């Protein structure tokens, strides 16, 4: 009832663990599989190990989180080792997320991920708290996608920033370059100031807002992608806390739904969302296909 075809990648349910949360090791990949996820996205990885931004790097607000992690990661070689050792024991696909600084890096990292067993590649072109990666590479997104498209035969997903103004033009251009789909959306560029200390709270000064405050933006973005590209694969992310939030994104047009910030409540949230979706569909006599993109 909850199975999903994401650009040819089969998911047992639409819940995808979003990049940047728990996808960092073989043990966590396997645990997320056991806990019921439909797919697991790795933490965005760079060509070489990266330590990230200075502490503090997370602040919790009443409507979400602002983080300035700065993409700390072990580098592509170690991440590929973790994927390679996990895949034979996994019942769900791993999506490898990369944060390249050039087309050459993108091509190299994507190829290594696929060789290691990743079922899809997510290109993170929209991290808002890193100067040489992410949001400053939006204009290079087409170049990155084209370089990967010539090297791999798995789906290419572009993780897009909510700061894009002309969504139809942007996603259409990326689709023509070879993108099979989109992860929508990344965090909103944000900042928090300690008014008592008269200085920014985050060590990296600027961060990315995630959680419930972002969800309406993500829903609108998903809706615009689906209307522009009816056949594109879409993972909707941003503030999904429960099954109703997930259903909303699917109704806007998402094939699958990423959860990240909600995992601060524990991994039980995965089954809470899937059980809620299943009950909703059974009670209404509907399928996921019936509600996907139902909003005119």
Image (cartoon, rainbow, N blue to C red):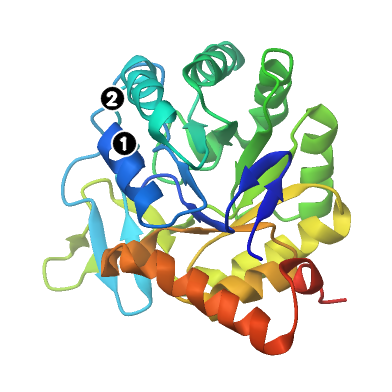
Depth check, mark 2 against mark 1: the one in front is 1
Q: Which mark sits nearer the N-terminus, 2 or 1?
A: 1
Left/right of residue 20 with respect to residue 229 in the rendered view: left
Occupied quadrant, residue 252: bottom right
Left/right of residue 115 with respect to residue 271 in the rendered view: right
Residue at the image position 65 percent from the left and 38 percent from the top: 157
Query: Could you tell me which secondary element the residue under label 1 belongs to?
Result: loop
Q: Quadrant of the N terminus?
A: bottom right
Residue at the image position 52 percent from the left and 27 percent from the top: 118
Residue 224, percent from left and from top: 79, 62
Q: Quadrant of the C terminus?
A: bottom right
Q: Nearer the viewer, residue 45 or 10?
A: 10
Residue 293, percent from left and from top: 80, 68
Q: Is residue 5 above or below residue 121?
A: below
Is residue 65 visible to us here?
no
Q: Are marks 2 and 1 in contact (CB under 8 Å)?
A: yes
Residue 132, percent from left and from top: 44, 28
Residue 56, percent from left and from top: 17, 52
In the picture, the disc for residue 74 is: 2
Q: Nearer the viewer, residue 111 or 195?
A: 111
Left/right of residue 6 with respect to residue 239 in the rendered view: right
Q: Is residue 20 above or below residue 26?
A: below
Occupied quadrant, residue 172: top right
Circle 1 residues within 10 Å: few <14, some 14–19, many ≥20:
many
Residue at the image position 41 percent from the left and 55 percent from the top: 208
Query: Could you tell me which secondary element the residue under label 2 belongs to?
Result: loop
Circle 2 residues within 10 Å: few <14, some 14–19, many ≥20:
many
Q: Nearer the viewer, residue 130 or 100?
A: 100
Q: Nearer the viewer, residue 145 or 196?
A: 145
Estimate the spatial distance between the alpha carbons at disc 2 and disc 1, rounded to whole Å: 8 Å
In the picture, the disc for residue 24 is: 1
Is residue 144 visible to us here?
yes
């Amino acid at each position: 009832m909850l199975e999903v075809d994401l650009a040819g990648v089969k998911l047992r349910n639409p819940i995808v663990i979003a990049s940047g949360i728990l996808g960092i090791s073989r043990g966590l990949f396997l645990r997320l599989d056991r806990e019921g996820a439909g797919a697991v996205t790795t933490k965005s990885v760079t060509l070489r190990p990266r330590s990230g931004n200075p502490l503090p790097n997370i602040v919790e607000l009443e409507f979400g989180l602002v983080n300035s992690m700065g993409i700390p990661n072990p580098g592509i070689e170690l991440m590929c080792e973790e994927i390679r050792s996990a895949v034979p024991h996994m019942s769900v696909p791993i999506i490898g997320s990369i944060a390249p600084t050039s087309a050459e890096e993108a091509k190299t990292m994507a190829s290594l991920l696929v060789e290691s067993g990743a079922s899809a590649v997510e290109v993170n072109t929209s991290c808002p708290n890193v100067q040489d990666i992410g949001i400053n590479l939006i204009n290079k997104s087409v170049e990155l996608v084209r370089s990967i498209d010539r090297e791999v035969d798995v789906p290419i997903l572009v993780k897009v920033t909510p700061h894009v103004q002309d969504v139809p033009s942007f996603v259409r251009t990326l689709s023509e370059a070879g993108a099979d789909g989109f992860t929508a959306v990344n965090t909103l560029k944000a900042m928090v100031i300690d008014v008592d200390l008269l200085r920014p709270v985050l060590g990296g000064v600027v961060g990315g807002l995630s959680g419930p405050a972002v969800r309406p933006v993500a829903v609108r973005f998903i809706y615009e992608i689906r209307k522009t590209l009816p056949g594109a694969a879409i993972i909707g992310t941003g503030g999904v806390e429960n099954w109703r939030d997930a259903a909303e994104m699917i109704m806007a047009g998402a094939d699958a739904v990423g959860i990240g910030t909600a995992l601060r409540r524990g991994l039980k949230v995965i089954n809470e969302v899937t059980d809620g979706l299943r009950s909703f569909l059974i009670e209404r006599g509907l399928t996921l296909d019936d509600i996907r993109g139902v909003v005119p």
